[in-house]
Amino acid sequence: MVLLASAVLEAVWATALGLSDGLTRPFPTLVFAVTASLSMLGLGMAIRHIPLGTAYAVWVGVGAALTVGWAMATGVEPFSVLKVLFIAGIVGCAAGLKALPQDR
């Protein structure tokens, strides 16, 4: 659950970074700094229980999917069926890695 929350925060910080105009706008910059820190903290906590490669793949995959999905939903990026299919592929691969048995 911590890993999923960290991935959501990754999407928030990526969006805030885009809105910060090169870290020149105070509020988006603050949101970026806080959520990036919390996201990294959560990822660090998750790798205590999940192999690093798997945790990172899930974190990046879910974060990327949410970031692109939000950008398309808000009109920042144009909607594309191909984008949706490729993002679904990323999420599917990350879920597959998470579903593999852990040999720890």
Image (cartoon, rainbow, N blue to C red):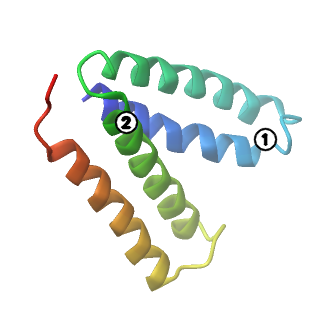
Q: Specify whether 61 is left or right of 28.
A: left
Q: Residue at x 46, y 45 (%)?
A: 60
The part of the image, by quadrant, that contains residue 100 is top left
Residues at marks 1 and 2, CA–CA distance in whole angstroms? 30 Å
Residue situated in front as seen by the camera: 30 or 68 = 68
Whole-percent x and y of residue 24?
A: 89, 35
Residue marked by disc 1: 20
Q: Earlier in the sequence, mark 1 or mark 2?
A: 1
In the rendered image of this protein, does residue 72 appear above or below residue 14?
below
The part of the image, by quadrant, that contains residue 75 is bottom right
Q: Quadrant of the C terminus?
A: top left
Q: Give me the disc on residue 53.
A: 2
In the orientation shown, which residue stands out farthest toward the right? Answer: 24
Labels 1, 2: front one: 2
In the rendered image of this protein, does residue 35 appear above or below residue 80?
above
Tell me the SS state at disc 2. Answer: helix
In the orientation shown, which residue stands out farthest toward the bottom? Answer: 81
Q: Specify whether 9 is left or right of 15.
A: left
| Three-letter code, disc 2 | Gly
Q: Residue at x 35, y 43 (%)?
A: 58
In the orientation shown, which residue stands out farthest toward the left? Answer: 101
Q: Residue at x 66, y 31 (%)?
A: 32
Label 1 Cα neighbours within 10 Å, binned few <14 / some 14-19 / many ≥20: some
Label 2 Cα neighbours within 10 Å, binned few <14 / some 14-19 / many ≥20: few
Tell me the SS state at disc 1. Answer: loop
Q: Specify whether 24 is left or right of 66.
A: right
In the rendered image of this protein, does residue 7 appear above or below residue 79?
above
Q: Give me the disc on residue 64.
A: none
Whole-percent x and y of residue 12?
A: 55, 40
